[in-house]
Amino acid sequence: MFQCMTDTLSALDAAFLELEQLDEGALMSIGGTLVFDPQAGRAPTVEELRATLSARLSALPRYTQRLSDTRVGGLAWPHWEPDPKFDIRHHVRRARVRAPGGDRQLCEWTAKFFSRPLGRARPLWEIVLLDGLEDGRWALAHKVHHCLVDGVGSVDVIGLLLDEQPDTERRRTESAPPAGPPAGAGRSLRSHTPEAIAQATSAGVRAGEATLHAALHPREALGRARALTELAVRDELIGAPRTSLNVPIGQTRRFAIVRARLAEMKAVGRELGGSFNDVMLAACAGGLRRLLIEREEPLPRSGLRAMVPVNVRSDSDAPERGNRVSSLFVELPVAEADVAERVRKIAARTRQLKASGAARGPTAMLDLADMAPPVLNEVSLAQTAFSRRLFNVTITNVPGSPDPMYAFGSELREVLPIVPLAADHAVGITIFTYNGMVSVGINADRNSVPDLDVLAAGIEESLGELRALAA
């Protein structure tokens, strides 16, 4: 039987796996730590957490499936197949943050949690129920491999636990099947030779469809080709500047959190003619500027180059389609001392990139990679799309709910978000908005960024300057 192609990893999905194989320091897990206020409810037990997830995992079949191969390579990409030994106890556990359970201890625990890679022999996700936080708070820390979800356009396992109302009674009374293998988990779909034939056939069909689409839409095809050419020029001729942010990294991490109010940052954008994202990029630029100054490094006049992921998932895209993200490459004017001028420069640059269709370059590269046999493009795609010549730092903006959310009767207070680090990229920043607040999560390599507090303080200082502008 041929493997259904929707169960086969895309070129980008496979590239995230390949990145880990090429460099052990590149851990491609995304997620974060969700902190809950206990005043309107109570922390669940780990048994309740497992039971609730067991009752709802049928909505996300990928979370009971494993990779057909633990390594990427050969003539066909891996596909998802049911895990015959799936046991939710392997994926949901309990832990305790050391006393006194404040920000410092929570950030330390989060850094250790994301320093451990996910084992590929099982479904690629994990949730930890955390207690020991100050003021009686509790948390859910979760991580999932980037090949499974894109962090922007897909629903992940944590979404199964969140409600718009603190309805604890419904959760306590809903029935839950025993934690064990799901129905049909014993049927393996693994069949390498037929799958390779099916994938090659599908690649030919996709290539034919792309050729027909290009013939019918020549202007769009020309735009994609131009964007792809510009991406190649940016990589090969106008490489990102060399800095101490782009050095070999290990697996251990540091983590810091910085906070702001969403309304204030939007007010700054309106005042200076930029978007909320432009304002936050300017704050991050201020933090990176301070870090380079403290390290006595020259400030690149052309700016540090940030890779800013862009969601390209359409309404018709099913979550099972895998990652549907592209990127904009934005120069951060770290040599600019004035925070307001940084916002204006970044706003002008992002408008220019969006008008030129620059995000189509990475998308076109990924579409072409999907058409070719895996053996031809796995390594080149992983190395090209995440090369240190292409960008210095990842900064991603993930929008959460504008309204309060609940789990087991407790209100979600905040989210500590994580973006993974590719090889030779020592810092990654996630901007997460939720319920009127902004959380800036800074993920960094432990050995090459011992001064993470300097970066965090620099972002906090820039946010303070921006707040003054809003006031």
Image: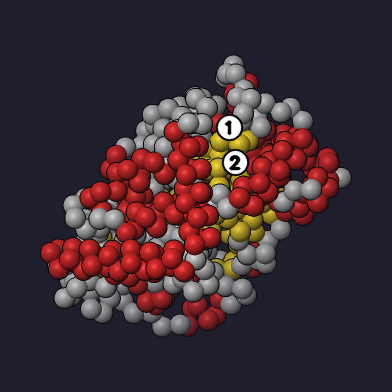
Label 1–label 2 contact, CB within 8 A:
no
Q: Position of residue 11 (x, y in %)?
A: 34, 55
Can residue 221 be seen by looking at this rendering? yes
Q: Position of residue 1 (x, y in %)?
A: 16, 76
Q: Mark 2 falls on what kind of element? A: strand
Q: Earlier in the sequence, mark 1 or mark 2?
A: 1
Can residue 141 be seen by looking at this rendering? no
Q: CA distance from mark 1 to mark 2?
A: 8 Å
Q: How many dots with numbers? A: 2
Mark 1 — residue?
A: 304
**Type of amino acid under label 1:** Leu
Above or below residue 249? Residue 42 is below
Mark 2 — residue?
A: 330
Left or right, 247 with respect to 106, comes to: left
Quarter assignment of residue 461: top right
Quarter assignment of residue 295: top right
Q: Residues within 10 Å of mark 2 (few under 14, many from 20)?
A: many
